[in-house]
Amino acid sequence: MASLLQPDRVVYLVRGQKRIRAPLSQLYFCRYCSELRSLECVSHEVDSHYCPSCLENMPSAEAKLKKNRCANCFDCPCCMHTLSTRATNIPAPLPDDPTKTTMKKAYYLACGFCRWTSRDVGMADKSVASGGWQEPENPHAQRISKLIEYYQQLAHREKQERDRKKLARRRQCMPLAFSQHTIHVVEKYGLGTRLQRQRPGAPISTLAGLSLKEGEDQKEITIEPAQALDEVEPLPEDCYTRPISLPEVTTLRQRLLQPDFQPAGASQLHPRHKHLLMKRSLRCRKCEHNLSKPEFNPTSIKFKIQLVAVSYIPEVRIMSIPNLRYMKESQVLLTLTNPVENITHVTLVTCEEEDPDDINSTAKVLVPGKELVLAGKDAAAEYDELAEPQDFQDDPDIVAFRKSNKIGFFIKVIPQKEEDTDVTVSFRMRHDFRNLAAPIRPNEEGGDANLEAVWLTHHVELRLGPLAP
């Protein structure tokens, strides 16, 4: 993160399935592979679904049944904010004496942002605060559900056909007696599902499908093809003469949020059930270890595992940039922060001329030739004024300042292209890393065993801004 509001000015290269350049604050670090990971090269797993309004937690099967929407919370159809339940008193006749009235409590939905209420569309008030709100019925719901069932059956047939072809190729490689005996045992005792449970993700499909009888006794679903109409409903007579009131016409976003109705007027807008959110885990595709795993409780924002890159990789930031001029040397001040508790040694190396990673550079960069030593992170040292500073014997021509686990150092930049685009420089940062994921075993002498340092190399790009006029 180069600055608070401009994190894209310093990016790190991720060498995954896709070469992605992203800020360090948006990356993860796998401690087992010792490599950077982006959201494009990790596996996303859904842990739980929950409503962002009432924080109700529900399993995936129930969320799928409810179409990923909360049954109790609603969104405003005009401004998409959360609707709240309001209570009011309305006169109601007494059951014993209809001529007399009494005040009765009623509830309706209201938006605190745009002042829309359920009474605007003619929705009746309810005597209870939760549930039971009137919902419009889609006239094409039966047709849509039948189409979904038909295409589910069609997809199931195509999957069966792929499994049959796969099994037919596999049968040619096994002896005839063995294959027939295997088919007989699986058909008789139904071992296919059990074997597949023991080997999830195995390439062999359900062995019970060897008999090719699966789904044959299911009811055939047929649908009537859609018919094109030659005649359409004519437009109203006052279509071109009636004055248009823009507040009564729905916007494109309001119509797309209700695709089953697509209301044309504001009087047809009905509240929609609130969409559920999910908590997801991130897993490294190479070693299959978790990089991020949140807590199950939707009220908690903490993580059980959160391997963000800013907690393990030294972070480069831009502190000050002078006026950059074409083919003139300028001195740029950068900062380097150590996020770990042990001392880290950093070496900066310029990219070679034919480096495939160096594709965006527009200037020549001269980095310090000496090794930069970063002190370990100590949260208590920032508040301890009596702590003695460590003596690292820094070169004043390279290191501008040192404070706790952060140093400021100089690099020299010579722009090579006289263009209006931003000046971009690239270099490689090499540093040592000690993996604390593995348990530390004491050695024979009784002390802790020293963790072996692994040297990591990262490609860093800096966008320094345009040339000075």
Image (tube, grey):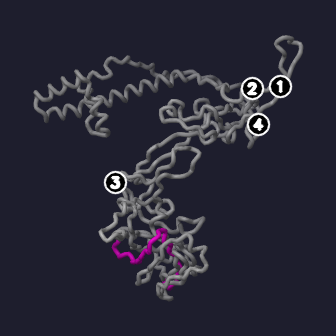
Tag nearer the camera, 1 or 4 = 1
Q: Which residue shows up at 41% across the image and 84% down it?
A: 370
Image check: 227 left or right of 196?
A: right
Image: magenta residue range: 327-355
Query: Which image quadrant for residue 157?
Result: top left
Q: CA distance from mark 2 to mark 1?
A: 10 Å
- Tell me the amino acid under the disc marked 3: Cys
Q: Which mark is residue 287?
A: 3
Tag nearer the camera, 3 or 4 = 3
Tag nearer the camera, 3 or 2 = 3
Image check: 439 left or right of 258?
A: left
Q: Which mark is residue 90?
A: 1
Q: Which mark is residue 245?
A: 4
Image check: 287 left or right of 105?
A: left
- Tell me the amino acid under the disc marked 1: Ile
Sequence-wise, the earlier of marks 3 and 1 is 1
Badge 4 density bin: few <14, some 14–19, many ≥20, Cα 10 Å: few
Tell whether position 17 is magenta. Answer: no
Badge 2 density bin: few <14, some 14–19, many ≥20, Cα 10 Å: some
Tag nearer the camera, 2 or 4 = 2
Mark 4 residue element: loop
With respect to residue 42, does 29 lie above or below?
below
Residue 410 in picture, x, y percent from top left: 50, 82
Q: CA distance from mark 2 to mark 4?
A: 28 Å
Judging by the rendered image, the residue that carries numbered circle 2 is 125
Badge 1 density bin: few <14, some 14–19, many ≥20, Cα 10 Å: few
Q: CA distance from mark 3 to mark 4?
A: 60 Å
Sequence-wise, the earlier of marks 2 and 4 is 2
Sequence-wise, the earlier of marks 3 and 4 is 4
